[in-house]
Amino acid sequence: MNRGIMKFNLIKTEKSKQKNIQSSGRLGELHTVHGVVKTPAFMNVGTSAAIKGGVSSHDLCDLKCQIALCNTYHLHLRPGDDVIRTMGGIREFMGWNAPLLTDSGGFQIFSLSSLRHITEEGVHFSSHIDGDKIFIGPKESMKIQSNLASTIAMAFDECIANPADYEYVKISCDRTFRWLISCKEEMERLNSLSDVLNRDQALFGINQGGIHEDLRIKHMEKITKLDLDGYAIGGLSVGESMEDMYRIVGTVAPCMPENKPRYLMGVGKPGNIIKSVALGIDLFDCVIPSRNARHGHLFTWDGAININNAKYITDETPIDLCCGCFVCEKYTRSYMRHLFNSKEALGMRLAVLHNLYFYNDLMEKIRAAISEGTLGDFVEQYGEKLDRRI
RNA sequence: GGCCCGUUAGUUCAGUUGGUUAGAACGCUAGCCUGUCACGCUAGAGGUCGUGAGUUCGAGUCUCAUACGGGUCG
């Protein structure tokens, strides 16, 4: 990397007016070959080149979505990364004309496949679709992501469920580091090929180390030296307590390069995001807004509601009076509850649209708060409130 | 009118030769979901077994009567 593929500019802001806050957050602009992302940002998750619940890439434009996320593992299995390469890359394929990040498949292999065998070269496992024997290692993951031609590729890593044995985490971290070196070399080679779809594909490294601070710091220091385009904290929100999660984020973030985007993978609830921004994180992704929406769990600025509840049967108010999304402009809780109760596909679609808008709106408000130097107030006002059920 | 079948949770139905606190599915009520196998997962409420007698230590189960529903034969 280090070829100027990607620029990350931190924007000077009002000095934090708060005292009881570790950091005032970072306001930035991530310049990619496919457009600019204002950070802190939330990446909208569309695992199989589609947001579950019937949301299209066209819808994403109306949701203030700046950057989408798709998954290497799923797309490799179906329709196949060769197919997507033939179709002009993932962005062309799904009609998304903005930045897009692909996850490496590491997490899926470790979370979906019970039958797997790890070697120095990668992982042998079975497809969750048809049980087919598959092998993916750092080189294979880079090749697939190069075929997908995403804006940003993620390194291939091992994501260990917490809590995990210290010795195993150490062995795994070292292997993940060797895999990262291999990822970097392979991505540089692929980017230099004459027939590559995206010769400017960026690569982010992923920090691991479970909930062990010393392993985390050591690993972070090692991967920083590789001078990648960005850095992620992986292996969190996978079983540990919230306390441990914030402790690790708080420990690792200060060790991350100041001038590179920092991505906290798989996090989280609105409160998790707000507090992590205060700890210095720039990028997030999470299935919560879409998955919970499909189950009737809707976010509002007063807390979360379950639209299935009987108390909404004749509720004439919108999901959230303060929300600017068209679902809240047009429909009542009563109608939403009816759609869910009668299992109409429209209910899910509207719910997902609302929650994704809420998340993107949340990020916009966070950026405004950082800009004005009032993130501390924001954390105090919303850090706990938004995650609570009302 | 005669004969036969049925009646068990809101609904559709299980329920063994009579044996602890009568089950399931769906529905209902609520909770959960953190780099998405997932319109999913978990839990809870809800039944004096149509009614009334009888046999029995003990009846949803056996006997009789009766009500209601369905079938069939004059």
Image: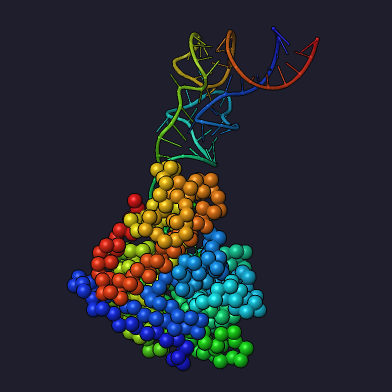
Residue at 51 percent across and 55 percent down: it is A348
| Residue A350 point in image, percent of width and height | 50, 57
Q: Is residue A214 above or below residue A271?
A: below
The colour scheme used to paint the residues is rainbow
| Viewer can see residue A5 | yes
Which is more toward the observer, A255 or A14? A14
| Viewer can see residue A248 | no
Q: Where on the picture, by quarter, is residue A132?
A: bottom right
Q: Where on the picture, by quarter, is residue A378?
A: bottom left
Residue at 30 percent across and 76 percent down: it is A371
| Residue A12 point in image, percent of width and height | 30, 82
Q: Is residue A150 left or right of residue A170?
A: right
Residue at 61 percent across and 69 percent down: it is A78
Q: How many marks on residues?
A: 0
| Residue A95 point in image, percent of width and height | 58, 73
Which is more toward the observer, A48 or A305? A305
Q: Is residue B50 left or right of residue B20?
A: right
Q: Where on the picture, by quarter, is residue A218?
A: bottom left
Residue at 59 percent across and 71 percent down: it is A94
Q: Is residue A333 above or below residue B72?
A: below
Most distant residue in the front direction = A329
Q: Is residue A74 left or right of residue A329?
A: right
| Residue A234 point in image, percent of width and height | 40, 73
